[in-house]
Amino acid sequence: MISSILDSPVLLGCAAALLSIAVAISILIFRVIFPTIIMHPWRLPPKDSRQSKSDKKSTVVLAGSFNPPHLGHLVMIRYLAERYGRVICCIGVNPNKQYDVTPQSRAEILREMLIHDGGCNNVTVEVVSGYIWRFARTQNASSFFRGIRTWDADGGDERTLQILNTWGPLILGRIWPMKTMFLEGDPQYRHVSSTLVRQICARRKEAIESEDSNADINKELTRLVPERVASKVAEVYGASS
């Protein structure tokens, strides 16, 4: 009798379902504990390889605040644009939060930065309300990227977002989460940060108000953001400081 119970199709089906759930949970836990980090120097798959052809057909999402965008962001975007068929830079917006510089203004600066960059013709910029993973699904994105300086520097903050992007789709959307990958910054630009850019813009504003020369400050700013958008960044972030 025990043997017949163990051989029951219902029991076997339940056991198989539980095993599948256990495997799925193990995979997701593994993703969180051992994140995928793409270290610099970034490499491209061999041209005409199966991986390269697959990547060229793929859409990926790079999410960030871009507050403001800077040269460190730009080199990351160039790499993704060269590797993948389509890149969407997403700026998340919380309708209940007040911003010194609106996500729309940040998106305009980033678009202007990319328009003049010949290697980013397959890149678009979107301002997204709600969960970015939901938007990424509507775009048939295959991967979700986050730019970091290094995992040691930014991993603590990124871990929370990674957990949300891993479990959120499964719990809230009942869909399998796309993989989150972390792109470590080019060492040449690891000293560059949005915070530093904002500080320089504030200093520039103070220099103008006190009628001091701001020539050195302008040069300092153009070492952090492309020269073609430096005046726009200074104007927008100077007004908000």
Image (cartoon, rainbow, N blue to C red):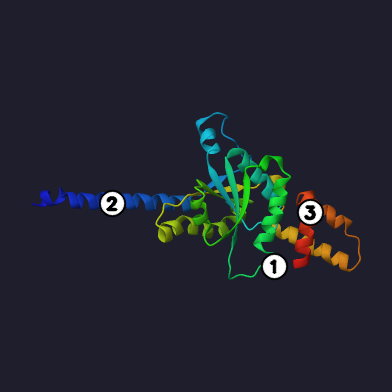
Q: Amino acid at mark 2?
A: Ala
Q: Amino acid at mark 3?
A: Ala
Q: Residue at x 91, y 66 (%)?
A: 211
Q: Which residue is mark 1?
A: 100
Q: Nearer the viewer, residue 84 or 44?
A: 84
Return the disc, 3 or 2, that comes first in the chain's sequence: 2
Return the disc, 2 or 1, that comes first in the chain's sequence: 2
Residue 6 visible within the image: yes
Q: Residue at x 19, y 52 (%)?
A: 11
For label 1, the SS is loop
- Spot occupied by residue 75 in the image (x, y as percentages of width and height): 68, 45
Relative side of 175 to 221, left or right: left
Return the disc, 1 or 3, that comes first in the chain's sequence: 1
Residue 187, picture quadrant: top right
Give the CA separation, mark 1 to mark 3. Answer: 18 Å
Q: Amino acid at mark 1?
A: Asp
Q: Residue at x 57, y 55 (%)?
A: 155
Give the CA separation, mark 2 to mark 1. Answer: 50 Å
Quadrant in which the C terminus is drawn = bottom right
Q: Nearer the viewer, residue 11 or 63?
A: 63
Query: Residue lying furthest left in this view?
Result: 1
Q: Residue at x 59, y 49 (%)?
A: 88
Q: Which residue is mark 2?
A: 17
- Spot occupied by residue 160 in the image (x, y as percentages of width and height): 52, 60
Q: Which residue is mark 3?
A: 230
Relative side of 236 to 219, left or right: left
Q: Nearer the viewer, mark 2 or mark 1?
A: 1
- Spot occupied by residue 23 in the image (x, y as percentages of width and height): 35, 49
- Spot occupied by residue 236 in the image (x, y as percentages of width and height): 76, 62
Tell me: residue 94, above or below residue 63. Answer: below
